[in-house]
Image: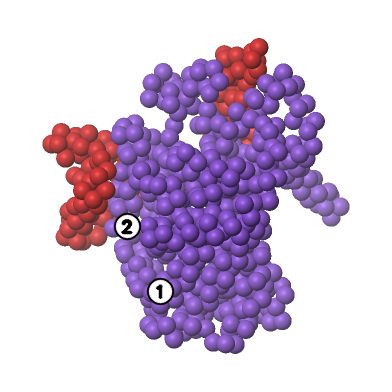
Chain colours: A purple, B red
Amino acid sequence: MSILDGLLQGFAVALTVHNVAWCFVGVFLGTIIGILPGLGPAATIALLLPLTYDMEPTGGIIMLAGIYYGAKYGGSTTSILLNMPGEASSVATCIDGYQMAKAGRAGPALGIAAIASFIAGTIGVLALTLIAPPIAAFALSFSSPEYFALMCLGLSLVVLLGGDSMVKGLLSLFVGLWLAGIGTDIFTAQSRFTFGTPALLDGLDFMVIAIGVFAISEVLATAEERGQARAIPVPRGIRNLLPSLAELKACRFAFLNGSVVGFIVGVLPGAGSSIASFIAYGIEKAVSRHPERFGNGAPEGVAAPEGANNADSGGALVPLLTLGIPGGGTTAILLSALIVWGIRPGPLMITESPDVFWGLVASMYIGNVILLILNLPLVPLFAQLLRVPVWLLLPIVLGISLVGAYAVSGSLLDVWLLAGFGLLGYLMNRLGFPAAPLILGFVLGDGMERAIRQSLMMSQGDLSILVSRPISATMLGLSLLILALPLLRWRRTRQATALGE
Amino acid sequence: MTVTRTDADRIAGLLLAGLGAFITATALEWDLMTDAGPGPGFFPLFYGIAMTVLSLGLVLQRFAGPSEGGDAPVAPEARRALAVWSILVGGILLLPVLGFPVVLGLLTLGVGFGVYRRPFGAVALAAVLVPAGFVVIFSLALGVDLPTGWLGF
């Protein structure tokens, strides 16, 4: 099936009444949680996932993906009006967006953010449409050693880019691998790390960990902050939200810059949209004829990061859908959702589940149009959400978390585990241990163990199988290089210090 | 006593080293290699050893020099977060007795009145309306099972 045929089939699936409705629900919820500080897309998708188990897979993934990319549209509203990012990906938007709002240009700043998000989001989906099928076709030749090497490469990138300390990132990853190992061994039925508790023989449920580490820890982090910031009012009427022609002209390179940078960074596991938005902002400032305007309300300073964090969504779905490797916490939850529905993301997904793959891709084009419509005329309405008091929001999130954890198996043990993982996530955040490697370690742990054990069965215990095959050798070499980078950097710094002295 | 960021790193490193040693010791009790291939202890042994080594490395690093946060105390504002977490744990303890709607009402009261010191009237109203909304949306509309208490709801 050609790309065009696939896309047409996808639109036939995505344009059914049900799927358009799920797409709308997803992007609408995404916009809301993007605007609300203290509740991110990972937490929301984790909270809603237990409620979607009975849904039809195409509609379910269309809705959850809508929350994922919709939140990035909403995040800019809080950045511009409050100088407080609704999402991590919108941090860079605060710099110039809030300055524009303070100067009485809140409407055009929101308009530029929406237009940049739409253009870059659509370019990101177009790139996903064109790049995913050839990557999936290439990955069809992969066997267990290549999969093991690929997971090592993905996880090492997540560890490198996921936080300030690589040691802490690796430790977080190993805790995730250990949590994945709790339960019954897939090959020998040996019970592992169950502490004699029969309820643990089936292993820990991903949803309990995800809701705890993302939702409960976000509630606890939000509870630390006192009071509630006051938002700059949004002018009513679409005309007051549209940027001037001069502003749009100034942003034309920023739209393209954000799209390209966002997509490329999105493909890399672990990089995430906040890195993409800062790189796009940096490039925009570096090539600008008037870099002094940045930080003082330059429209390009809003367009570039907003474009990048939206194009990132399309990029992040490339490794998830074609290789089955999620690059971050939110895509890890999307992976587990697909597995729950009986769909295995990877090279065979396009041929085995074309309706789900192409339906999702096509729905993202539709979702971007819905988001543009929602975020231009309706943004004053959404901005009212910033008035919801935190003391009311927190018990609601706690309540949804309890319902979500209990819905997994109807057991109070899961609810206790939820509280434990919530505290763990909060402490990790406080002590600088990134949560994404833990989540990815948990999601990929089973697959990684299966791949290494199958590889060694193929080679009768000979580890050289991992380096005697060119693709796995290259990927393992790259992983080692990535893990050695901080050591090389440390050595260079020491040499520079010694020379200086 | 104030716990600094460096202290916290040392404590976390020691705890993780203990976990790594436990994983390694447990994995050694299982088969590492069998005739059919690697056994159940094979994979945990690798990450158990790696976890122990890296955690001890982190501890030694923090004894050799301060962490990035240095001697800054670890989150004096964490008290409010831990208060909210304690309220959650208290609520879970009461779940099998009082059931979900009552516990959610108490959680709302605890967070709104206990932690945020909002006017009691407004918080009490929310403590009635929020659980009612949950029952309508989750239990009645979506058919989701909510934890029930001794009183049957």
**What is the three-letter code of the residue carrying label 2?**
Leu
Q: Is residue A476 above or below residue A365?
A: above
The image quadrant of residue B24 is top right
Q: Which residue is mark 2?
A: A393
Work out whether mark 1 precedes mark 2 in sequence or the reverse, and give the earlier one: 1
- The N terminus of chain B sits in image quarter: top left
Give residue A47's position: percent from left, percent from top.
38, 48
Residue A472 is left or right of residue A377, and the answer is: right
Q: Which residue is mark 1?
A: A379
Residue drawn at the location 48% of the way across and 43% of the way down: A338
Residue drawn at the location 35% of the way across and 67% of the way down: A385
Q: Is residue A308 above or below residue A439?
A: below
Would residue A382 be visible to someone looking at this image?
Answer: yes
Would residue A272 be visible to someone looking at this image?
Answer: no
Callout 2 crowding tier (Cα within 10 Å): few <14, some 14–19, many ≥20: some
Residue drawn at the location 79% of the way across and 37% of the way down: A470
Q: Is residue A294 above or below residue A47?
A: below
Q: Marks 1 and 2: CB-CB under 8 Å?
A: no
Chain letter behind tag 1: A
**What is the three-letter code of the residue carrying label 1?**
Val
Residue A55 is left or right of residue A365, and the answer is: left
Q: In what element is the residue under mark 1?
A: helix
Give residue A45's position: percent from left, percent from top.
43, 50
